[in-house]
Image (cartoon, rainbow, N blue to C red):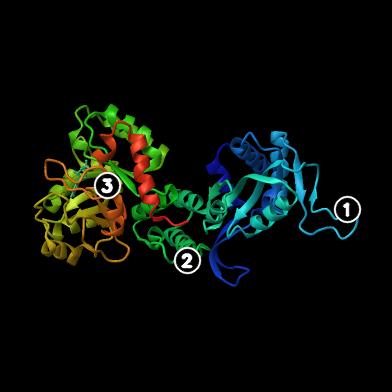
Amino acid sequence: MKNSANFLKTLVDIECVKFGDFTLKSGKQSPMYIDLRNIVSHPSMLTELSYLFKDKISNSIQRICGVPYAALPIATVVSIQTGLPMIIKRKEVKKYGTKKIVEGEYNVGDKVLLIEDVITSGESLIETIKELESEGLLIEQIIVVLDREQGGVKRLIDKGYQVESLFSILSLVELLFKERKIDNVIYTNVLHFIQHNSIIDSPSKKPKKYLQKTHSNETAQRLLGIAYRKKSNLIASIDLITTKDIIGLLNEIGNDICAAKLHIDIISDFTPSFIDELLIIAKRFDFLLIEDRKFADIGNTQLLQLSKGMYAISSWADMVTIHLIAGESALKAIQDWDSEKKPALIPVIEMSSSGALTDQDYIEKCKKFMYNYTDVIGVVCQTAELNEGFLKFTPGVNLESKNDDKGQNYNSPKYAIEELHSDFLIIGRGIYSANDPKNEIGKYLLAIRELDFFGA
Ligand code: 5BU
């Protein structure tokens, strides 16, 4: 086995993860079934796991312990791979002899790595932790193979433990969806299930908006999946004019964004090979590409502008912006366009600039027809309220400034999310003009994560 993606796909092949309609122990219906116990019959999977764990183990660890029973074989191979001694926590205390709860050699104060196969609520981990701690052991690190993303990790982090998972159910379904191994329905059902089955109950906090959003459009689902997984709804508007600067910036901040927005026609040294480079980087860092072309012509011209010329936008952009000024016919022309590669559409129905002509009347006119088109995944707007499921992209976001000297108006990330109910924040100069863009984007991430926008 060579990489994590193969490991995840093999989990499905060996039926450790199944999709369908399952009844859980609790009686609840679930669209997925996860049981990693079959891994014991696949030595190559255990070996791969031992490598994956080895990369993550902190230097201070003195003992390894698996949560019984499923994680015991995993702990064993990790112990062999790392040379770190193992201890075993019994599930039941022996009724005779030593009555020990922890087998193996250890000293009070030893720093333990605790291994678990799957985490849901974190309950069995908490039980194991309690018992190990009562023996005087210190839980230094917890590594879980698969996080069901139902709140268990957060619960343990809140208790002060250092927890990480090798994989999450979301990264698994994302991968399978991308590779067309599961369809829209399964993908959406899993998202729904996670949304409604988190053990974290925080009514005082803002609703976990991302998980409540679903959209039948595949690109919208991918964008939501990436945003949720990276816990970033930031779209970097890379309004730079040389390919070197653009690539340089994306290499710096690629991990922190769910999409990059470009104005491809402002690049002074554009060549088609730039697109190849861009696509490689987008894939490497896992973000989508938006061309902010704002098409605004009759249907026929828009199709030419989308697909022809040196930018051949439809060949690479995952999403494009479009004005609806030409009316429904121009939108319909794109929707009816029979093209193998067609970007999702984000109409601009309201602008951030002072004196914009996009008044309430215009917004309502756009709304009258745009919802009928499945290529439309959401809109660029400021205050407009949208139908359930439609994504709201908001430019004019900046932590430092209120406006520029050319008509742009800015809101803070907090205001955009809490007051404008924005789903995705588009940030240009706030990031790319900063002295240290990586450090600056960290501030934006902190601002959105403080709002608990992504839930657990
Ligand atoms: P800024 O540097 O954060 O101001 O960049 C904002 C980007 O969003 C920039 O590329 C604009 O073209 C784009 N934008 C906007 O600012 N306001 C709008 O209403 C629309 C797009 Br539509």
Dot 3: element: strand
Q: CA distance from mark 1 to mark 3?
A: 63 Å
The numbered mark at residue 98 is: 1
Residue positioned 24% across, 53% down in the render: 346
Mark 3: C-beta under 8 Å from nearest atom of ligand 1: yes
Q: Residue furthest right?
A: 97
Q: CA distance from mark 3 to mark 2?
A: 29 Å
Dot 2: element: helix
Instruction: Give above or below for 371 relative to 220.
Output: below
Three-letter amino acid code of the residue under disc 2: His
Looking at the picture, tell me which residue is in the foreground, 138 or 336.
138
First-in-chain label (3 vs 2): 2
Front position among marks 1 and 3: 1
* Left or right: residue 442 compared with residue 103: left
**Quarter of the picture holding the N terminus:** top right
First-in-chain label (1 vs 2): 1
The numbered mark at residue 426 is: 3
User: Percent position (x, y) of residue 106?
Assistant: 78, 42
The numbered mark at residue 415 is: none
Q: CA distance from mark 1 to mark 2?
A: 45 Å
User: Percent position (x, y) of residue 453?
Assistant: 39, 56
Q: Which residue is mark 2?
A: 196
Looking at the picture, tell me which residue is in the foreground, 32 or 196.
196
User: Percent position (x, y) of residue 102?
Assistant: 78, 50
Instruction: Give above or below for 252 relative to 139.
Output: above
Front position among marks 1 and 2: 1
* Left or right: residue 362 compared with residue 55: left
Three-letter amino acid code of the residue under disc 1: Thr
Looking at the picture, tell me which residue is in the foreground, 159 or 406.
159
Instruction: Give above or below for 206 relative to 47.
Output: below
- Do the residues bearing badges 1 and 3 touch, measured as CB atoms within 8 Å? no
First-in-chain label (1 vs 3): 1
